[in-house]
Amino acid sequence: MTKTARPKTDEKAADESGRANVTFMPGAAPPARRRRRSRAWLWLPVIAALGGAGYYGWRAYAPTETATAIITQPVTRGDIENAVTAVGTLEALKSVDAGAQVSGQLKALHVAIGDTVTKGQLLAEIDPATIENRMEINRAELANLQAQLVSKKAQLDFKQANITRQRSLVAGNAAAKQALDQAVADLAAAEADVNATEAQIRKQQATLGGDEVDLGYTKIYAPMAGTVTANPVKEGQTLNAVQSAPTIVTIADLSTMTVRAEVSEADVGRLKVGMEAYFTLLGQPGKRFAGTLRQIEPSPTVENNVVLYNALFDVPNPNGELMMSMSAQVFFVQAAARDVLVVPAGAVSAKRGEGGKAEVTVVTASGAQEVRQVETGIRNRVSVEVKSGLAEGDKVVVSAGGGKASGGGSRNSGRGMRMPPMF
């Protein structure tokens, strides 16, 4: 038999330890262990990603409990009014255009925009040279006619003397009757010439008087006291007053202003002449300027198919703080109450209880809710006056609606959205 070669062992060492001899073969087992460990590390990111996705889904889609949110407000005491609102502009109560009634060059302008003038004050002057020349010609013509009148009257006196003489001659049979007839005709013609010349003189005098009036028109005086608000012409400009009178300055009385409010056709029926009105300005929102509705103009204006009616009321302006063309937020007061109990309009139920009283939900001191019937008064879009049924400080329910917990909010916000990538 062939003997198998065996590795040599240290028999002495084996005897000393009492155990079997073990021979180690390097490089056999370690490679397999390292491969199993490397595959395990590859699965760790996948497991982490699945765990994160599961936690995200549980947080986003887990059912949550719902709660009812109740909004309350206390009953307060204050002022309330029901008013028709509109947008308006400010204009002067009285204004006038001072214009030129004669043509010519504007020689001098004595006022500027913003100046305060008195009635009869000289505002401007137009060059009077043309009118003065025309007046000189008319005076000469008048003098000529007056000289002609003297000549005509002398002829008339001669004709009268001639007819007297002819009558004496005819009476003594010293002249023919034909000569007397001719003398009568000559006298009538002389009288007609005198009358015609006197008529021409009167006409020329009237023309000269018109020239004097035109000469007075070359100086423009203020027709009323007020403030100069416009000046459309300048010194040296030529004015043509043949077809229309050109405006030189506009004078307005700013001591009283008129508010011209544009009210829609849906609200104009709620307005009554004499009702209280006030407005606020953009620059002074906290200040009210009060007046009384004076007029509702019957003719509307149409803007972009919207029918608007002009409602006018006047306000004093002693300090001059109100200016023309200012924009105003206008309120026409239908009803108003001062120092009354007021609740939000959303707290009053549209359902009516006994006796037609409105219903309001009140939160008691214990936290319970009870429905009370209240008598209401003035109502607007924001607040309602309460005449009875509530006390100041009572908490009324304005609105109640379903609400979600914090987790529910996340769930709702996450629906319909793509989940962000985890890796």
Image (cartoon, helix red, strand yellow):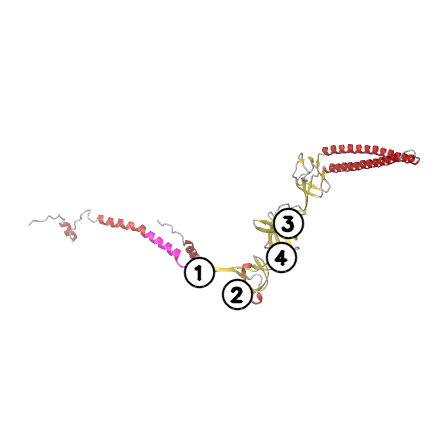
Identify whether 257 is placed above or below 236.
Answer: below
- Residue that mark 3 sits on: 259
Could you tell me if the residues under marks 1 and 3 are in contact, i.e. CB atoms within 8 Å?
Answer: no
Residue at screen point 29% across, 51% down: 43
Identify whether 186 is placed above or below 414.
Answer: above
Marks 1/3: CA distance? Answer: 55 Å
- Looking at the picture, which amino acid does disc 4 mark? Gln
Marks 1/2: CA distance? Answer: 23 Å
Question: Mark 1, mark 3: which one is toward the viewer?
Answer: 3
Q: Per the image, is 63 magenta?
A: yes
- Residue that mark 1 sits on: 66
Q: Per the image, is 301 magenta?
A: no
Badge 4 marks a residue whose secondary structure is strand
Residue at screen point 79% across, 32% down: 144
Is residue 383 among the parts visible in the rendering? Answer: yes
Residue 228 placement (x, y as % from top left): 67, 41
- Looking at the picture, which amino acid does disc 1 mark? Thr
- Looking at the picture, which amino acid does disc 2 mark? Glu
- Residue that mark 4 sits on: 334
